[in-house]
Amino acid sequence: MRCLLGLLVIAGAALGADAPELLQKARAVAKQGQLAEALKLADQAVAADAKSAAVVQFRGELHETLGNHEKAVADFSQVLALDPKLAEAYNRRGSEQFKLGKVAESLADFDKFLELRPREKPGHWKRGISLYYAGKYKEGKEQFEAYEQVDTNDVENAVWHYICHARAASPEKARAALLKIGKDQRVPMMEVYALFAGKAKPADVMAAAKADDLPAAQLKVRLFYAHLYLGIHHDIAGEPKLALEHMTEAAEKYRIGHYMGDVAKVHLDLLRKEKK
């Protein structure tokens, strides 16, 4: 029934609907989960009015959701050519640039976004990650320190602060200045925190991730985060073989749809380049 509805909407759109009407229909179809059909309608809407920032922005968001990163970047660039003050287009393009491994470009977009929306800076953890991969460790450390204003129970923030500090100074200094957190409810994040604090072993992280009898989808998420942060731990410790093994598991076998899944892929690509 849903497929039939989508086809009927698209057929109706082809009979001369204007861009606002096509956009409205595309949004409705997208809400039903029919993203391919929504994209066809969005293409028609752009063809009807390529100078509508709202229309092009929506198509870019669809490409983003569908994993069409290069097309998403192209659309967000078109949006910004139409209206350079649309902050969210910079933010979204920055994320897509990062997913393509274009770290410097992602950072430039995030910085432009924050020029337009400075109040968002403390919570912009994506910018902190781009700073790390851009080799701007001191700025990255400061970004993750600022995130404490947003959440003091996030192990990941403490870990990224640690690795920025470790690169800028040393693992010993980073461990001494490890951000204090409350309780991160996600398993095995507290074991990950203990690992970077020097109070746990990699085996403890894996044991916690596998401790419960979980549905496959939930276990996958746990194992993704376990392997991601074990890979990062070994990388910082100067153990490239183990770093590569764990990051391969995170980025390929257990990769999740969250932005951190893309972080794992970017990190893995860098490890493989270093190996060559």
Image (spheres, rainbow, N blue to C red):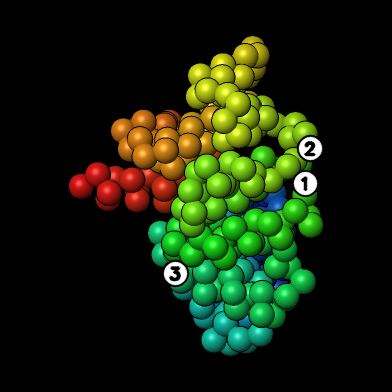
Residue at left offset 52%, top offset 69% = 107
Decide: few, some or many residues near mark 3? Use Cα within 10 Å; few <14, some 14-19, many ≥20: some
Coordinates of residue 236 in the picture (x, y in percent): 44, 42
Decide: few, some or many residues near mark 1? Use Cα within 10 Å; few <14, some 14-19, many ≥20: some
Q: Inspect the image, locate mark 1, and give the three-letter code of the amino acid beneath it.
A: Thr
Placement of the N terminus among the 4 image quadrants = top right
Gap between marks 2 and 1 measured at Cα = 6 Å
Q: Inspect the image, locate mark 3, and give the three-letter code of the amino acid beneath it.
A: Ala
Q: Can you say whether 192 is above or below 57 in the image?
A: above
Residue 158 visible here: no
Q: Nearer the viewer, mark 1 or mark 3?
A: 1
Q: Can you say whether 141 is above or below 58 in the image?
A: above
Q: Nearer the viewer, mark 3 or mark 2?
A: 2
Q: Are marks 2 and 1 in contact (CB under 8 Å)?
A: yes
Image mark for residue 182 = 2
Q: Nearer the viewer, residue 60 or 90?
A: 90
Give the secondary structure at mark 1.
Answer: loop
Q: Are marks 3 and 2 in contact (CB under 8 Å)?
A: no
Q: Inspect the image, locate mark 2, and give the three-letter code of the amino acid beneath it.
A: Gly
Image mark for residue 104 = 3
Residue at left offset 77%, top offset 49% = 151
Sequence order check, earlier mark of 2 and 1: 1
Residue 53 visible here: yes
Decide: few, some or many residues near mark 2? Use Cα within 10 Å; few <14, some 14-19, many ≥20: few
Gap between marks 1 and 3 measured at Cα = 28 Å
